[in-house]
């Protein structure tokens, strides 16, 4: 057969995905400031080798990082003008040492040799602020023995540390006037503690403990702002249970904690007015889900779920400030496991550049699109294998989706397909239940709800499913790949939601995916069955009575599940393929015939396992829905290609499949038999 050719071309296809910048090795913390005179914000990142300096190159872009190497791995960093020369200096510390290091900035992004100051052991947080109101920046260091306060002299030097006994090691800390006396106080989270401690400042650098307020188990991050507009500072805390809000009384005490969100994977929280309504909103970071979610404050003093966005792997810290110089709040995330910083540019109205993300249950493995409530907007259905469920999310045509409705199906569902199986004009669902050796058929009522499942027995270990009218009677049929019995089951529909005739055929070992198309040009839908281990496939060609016995074929090397659509609007079908090991998907642009460009990569979340395609925001461009099994999320890659009309869907997809055009890659790959 003819091999598929690859050629290099300019990237004519684009998706609204996250923007990542290299940030050293194992970065953990970050601050922003103006290190040179170009009036562009710069980033200073604490990483596993020292400090990575990312100078602003243009609004929203940063240079390749310069590294200040140290003998240890800094885990906290702060900036201020310690020597009064009008240039930002940097202070940082490592949990492996018992000191804080200060390096003076030269105004061009460079720094002098470090000066070292003794603190307590295992420092976790460094704050740079004026605690004694002498207009000189001081250092407050939280560490394993308490807090060290180093008063600055305004010339770059610091007095010997004054120690504050906190009783337990300090894990996180912020400074603000919690008591309303005009002096800076400290709010401290102690390692392995379950409370937030307020230490009242005396205006000279001394601090006295006040009564502690209970929070959740092992609190790890906090942020202080006036969230309810009463003039008193409040605190939002991330702990092992999730996110809590403690409303302050302005005297250093707090009301009992309110649990805002339960999620043990939260790692950080930031606060800012991201939508310009004058209220302080929250951004929370889920390191396992590779997601940053906004919680928007409303007029009732409540926080409601805002959009969520895909970020890198192992998120460790958030910045919420203007990082592009346009006066609008942006968000930046330090990604410890992907050695990067993700930048999300804000529009000032509560939305950010990047890939929208949806929570998709405990174990998402596959998805399909369809107009399940017949409002002419695409909806999503997502299979969750470990919970034996399907989640249905209704779309509004603007890439926004409702909270999911959960449907019970058989044991270990692994694949699904939508179609009108009972002939009532309303989309239904068919789900391959790997652990139950059956297919669950759920009849839709046209409002987004589905009836209880009807189960049809198939072979052992069904893991893939497609629908088409294989016997040309006007009713949709189903084909199911049975990976444990090395067979494919053809379920012929009667048009009333039932499948009275089932035919089983032996196929290539461990079948894992199915593709439909007109292989031999007879205008009938044929079936290709393949696996993930070699290039062998089984071809089932259609005749007047349905699909015939399989014949063997060869598809070439590296056969993988894929989606074929015209993503760039040039009239040629392109390919979209998941790269589970690389946490990304690739697009191969088609040029007609057997020619494809080299892959163009787009980052997504952890372990992308499946793809679906459709115009979810109704801009006449085909978008991608990416199922990420490792992060339990759905990432929406919204197509932003410059060509309009890239095969977009103005309404729901047709219920009956149409034969693929000549650009169908499966037709090209099999036409030689």
Image: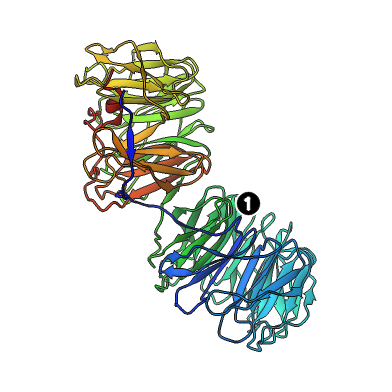
Crowdedness near tag 1: few (<14), some (14–19) or many (≥20) residues, C-alpha within 10 Å: some
What kind of colouring is applied to the model shown? Answer: rainbow
Q: Is residue 87 above or below residue 437?
A: below
Quadrant where the N terminus lies? top left
Closest to the observer, 364 or 66? 66
Count of numbered circles on the image: 1
Mark 1 falls on what kind of element? Answer: loop
**Residue 555 relative to residue 654: left or right:** right
**Residue 393 relative to residue 239: left or right:** left
Closest to the observer, 65 or 171? 65
* Residue that mark 1 sits on: 241
| Image location of residue 279, percent across then percent down | 46, 70
| Image location of residue 331, percent across then percent down | 48, 63
Q: Is residue 392 above or below residue 115?
A: above
| Image location of residue 319, percent across then percent down | 53, 65
Closest to the observer, 338 or 466? 338
Quadrant where the C terminus lies? top left
| Quarter of the rendering containing residue 99 | bottom right
Q: Is residue 164 above or below residue 268?
A: below
Which residue is rendered at x = 43% and y = 16% of the image? 508
Residue 70 visible in the shown view: yes
């Amino acid at each position: 057969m003819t091999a598929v050719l690859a050629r290099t071309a300019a990237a004519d296809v684009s998706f609204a995905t996250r923007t990542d910048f290299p940030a050293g090795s194992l970065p953990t913390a970050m601050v922003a400031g103006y290190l040179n005179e170009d009036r562009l914000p710069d980033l200073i990142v604490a990483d596993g080798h020292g400090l990575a300096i990312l100078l602003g190159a243009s609004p929203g872009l940063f240079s390749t990082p310069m590294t200040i190497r140290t003998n240890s791995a800094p885990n906290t960093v702060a900036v201020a003008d310690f020597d009064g020369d009008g240039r930002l200096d940097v202070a940082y510390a490592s949990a492996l040492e018992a000191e804080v290091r200060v390096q003076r900035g030269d105004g061009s992004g460079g720094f002098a040799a470090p000066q070292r100051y003794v603190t307590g052991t295992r420092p976790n947080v460094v704050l740079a602020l004026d605690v004694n109101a002498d207009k000189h920046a001081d250092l407050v260091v939280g560490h394993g023995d308490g807090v060290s306060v180093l008063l600055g002299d305004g010339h770059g030097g610091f007095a010997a540390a004054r120690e504050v006994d906190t009783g337990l090691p300090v894990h996180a800390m912020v400074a603000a006037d919690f008591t309303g006396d005009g002096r800076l106080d400290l709010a401290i989270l102690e390692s392995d503690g379950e409370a937030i401690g307020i230490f009242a400042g005396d205006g000279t650098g001394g601090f006295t403990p006040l009564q502690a307020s209970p929070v959740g188990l092992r609190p790890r991050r906090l942020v202080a702002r006036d969230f309810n507009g009463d003039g008193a500072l409040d605190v939002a805390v991330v702990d092992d249970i999730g996110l809590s809000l403690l409303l302050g009384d302005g005297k250093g005490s707090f009301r009992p904690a309110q649990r805002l969100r339960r999620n043990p994977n939260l790692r950080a929280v930031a606060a800012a007015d991201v939508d310009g309504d004058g209220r302080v909103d929250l951004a929370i970071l889920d390191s396992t889900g590779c997601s940053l979610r906004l919680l928007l404050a409303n007029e009732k003093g409540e926080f409601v779920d805002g959009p969520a966005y895909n970020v890198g792997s192992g998120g460790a810290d958030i910045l919420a400030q203007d990082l592009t110089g346009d006066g609008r709040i942006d968000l930046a995330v330090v990604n410890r496991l992907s050695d990067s910083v993700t930048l999300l540019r804000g529009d000032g109205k509560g939305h950010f550049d990047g890939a929208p993300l949806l929570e998709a249950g405990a174990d998402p493995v596959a998805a399909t699109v369809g107009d399940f409530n017949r409002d002419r907007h695409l909806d999503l259905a997502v299979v969750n294998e470990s919970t034996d469920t399907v989640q249905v999310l209704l779309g509004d045509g603007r890439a926004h989706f409702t909270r999911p409705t959960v449907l019970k199906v058989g044991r270990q569902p692994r694949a699904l397909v939508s179609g009108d199986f009972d002939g009532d004009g309303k989309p239904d669902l068919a789900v391959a239940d790997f652990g139950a050796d059956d297919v669950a058929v759920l009849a839709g009522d046209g409002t987004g709800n589905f009836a209880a499942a009807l189960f049809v027995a198939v072979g052992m270990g069904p893991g893939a499913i497609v629908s088409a009218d294989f016997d040309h009677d006007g009713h949709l049929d189903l084909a199911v790949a049975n990976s444990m019995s090395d067979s494919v089951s053809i379920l012929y529909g009667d048009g009333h939601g039932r499948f009275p005739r089932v035919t089983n055929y032996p196929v290539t070992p461990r079948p894992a995916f199915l593709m439909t198309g007109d292989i031999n040009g007879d205008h009938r839908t044929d079936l290709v069955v393949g696996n993930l281990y070699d290039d062998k496939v089984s071809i089932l060609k259609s005749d007047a009575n349905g699909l015939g016995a399989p014949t063997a074929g060869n598809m070439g090397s590296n056969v993988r599940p894929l989606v074929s659509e015209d993503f760039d609007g040039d009239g040629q079908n392109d390919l979209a393929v998941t790269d589970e090991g690389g946490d990304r998907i690739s697009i191969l642009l088609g040029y007609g015939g057997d020619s494809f460009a080299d892959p163009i990569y787009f980052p997504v979340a952890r372990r992308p396992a499946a793809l679906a395609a459709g115009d979810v925001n109704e801009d006449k461009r085909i978008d991608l829905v990416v199922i990420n099994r490792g992060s339990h999320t759905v990432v929406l890659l919204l197509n932003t290609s410059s060509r309009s009309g890239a095969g977009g869907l103005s309404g729901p997809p047709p219920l009956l499949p149409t034969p693929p055009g000549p650009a169908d890659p499966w037709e090209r790959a099999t036409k030689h038999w």
